[in-house]
Amino acid sequence: MTQFLFGLFLLIGLMLPPVANLMESVMIVHMHMQMPMLVIAGFLMARIFQQRFPQFFAKYNQNGVPGILLFIIIIAYWMLPRTMDEALTVQSVEIFKFISLPFLAGVPLRDSWKKLSKPAKNNIITLFTVMFLGMGWLYIQSNAQLCNNYLVIDQIILGWGFITMAICMVIYLIYVFAVDPSQYE
Amino acid sequence: MIKNRQTKVSSILVLVFGLILFYVGTDGFTAYTAESARVTKLIEDQPEFPDVTFEDSEGRTYSISEFKGKYVFITFIYTGCTTICIQLEENMSQVYDLIPSEYLGKDIVFLSISFDPARDDPATLDKYKDLFKSDGETWRMARIPEQAQLDTLLKKFGVIVIPDGNGNFAHNSAFYLVDQQGALVDVMDFTKVTEAADKLVNIMEADKEE
């Protein structure tokens, strides 16, 4: 319950217009802070849904695949330059952002992650590494303004943000493949 | 076994949902940036050029009706710009050179509109136009002194201008084509010079045959 309240307060806090406006005024904060925080809010709230509807999750997300697919789709959708722009200019897209990221990405992530096998988890991380490298490259090399509401310099900063995250994930993957924890136990 | 089937069904549902979400979100997998969506919508809507008063590099003032019966090929610029506008105007000048001179001024007029009226007075525009060998007649450069009118135009034509705080502006760039009746009929990629020129010449020739 406490977790749920934390998640709920986080979501409400993020939705407050002054907070939302402030975070959205900087491109990289919009993409790499506000959006992940919305996912985290959903992740925290997920527990209560799992307890209330255990049947539903057991039936329709038995092996975790549908949930993680939904997570990937929602995250990929919010990586499009256009959706970021429209979240700022179109009210309904902004509302969809505040609903989809916590409830369609955060909640299924929590339910699915534990159900996935280790190789599956690593594959998901690899997939996101590739996606982040691709998006980073796209935002850095593009001289044209991809988002009408942000400057090209913001775009380049965001691109490097993507690359940095990708590098972190690569380090993690190397660690997973190179180190066998059982040797140290 | 039955449980597995339900999970399969929900996987498929999720994928269908994803497909619809991306389809709707990108106008049928065509517009991945807000800019391309904007252009698609403009060409569909064909908005009328609003009633604004220009002041050109020679200090003349007129409205869009000055160009009635002619096509107007438009770009939006500001003269203090050191990056994209120069490329935009350079490309515009290449299009200008590719248009047969018989059409220039008679069937089509080139017009560069400044969105920085505070600094781009007629004298500044006059100097700027010489950089691109604009003659001030068949290719005019003008500002819209009235800020309210300028804002209406920018909004209608979807030109987004963001001041960066150092006296510069970030803005989206394109070639705009307004027809004889003052309706926006096309928005072209400003990096594709020959394509734009070919399009213009085709339109002129088609009109001549009529």
Image: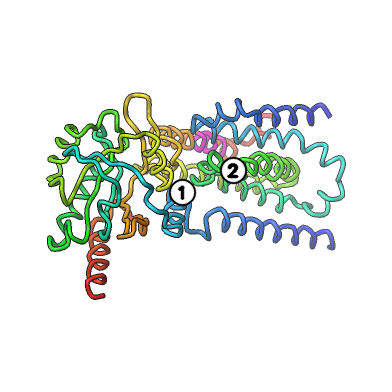
A36 is higher (above) or lower (below) than A56 = above
The residue shown at (51%, 59%) is: B29
The residue shown at (77%, 52%) is: A61
- Left or right, residue B154 beside residue B72: right
Q: On what subunit does the disc labeled 1 rest?
A: B
Sort mark 2 into few (<14), some (14-19) or many (20+) by Cα contacts within 10 Å.
some
Q: On what subunit does the disc labeled 2 rest?
A: A
Q: Is residue A171 magenta?
A: yes
Viewer-proximal residue, B72 or B38?
A: B72
Disc assigned to residue A125: 2
Q: Label 1: which residue?
A: B33
Amino acid marked by disc 2:
Ile
Residue B112: x %, y % from top left: 25, 45
Q: Secondary structure at mark 2?
A: helix
Q: Quadrant of the C terminus of chain B?
A: bottom left
Q: CA distance from mark 2 to mark 1?
A: 26 Å
- Left or right, residue A47 beside residue A161: right
The residue shown at (22%, 70%) is: B205
- Left or right, residue B44 beside residue B6: left
Q: Is residue B78 magenta?
A: no
Q: What type of secondary structure mainly makes up the magenta span? A: helix
Give residue A51's quadrant in the image.
top right
Residue A37: x %, y % from top left: 64, 32
Viewer-proximal residue, B165 or B158?
A: B158
The residue shown at (37%, 34%) is: B147
Q: Which residues, given as a range, are shown in magenta? A: A165-173
A153 is higher (above) or lower (below) than A131 = above
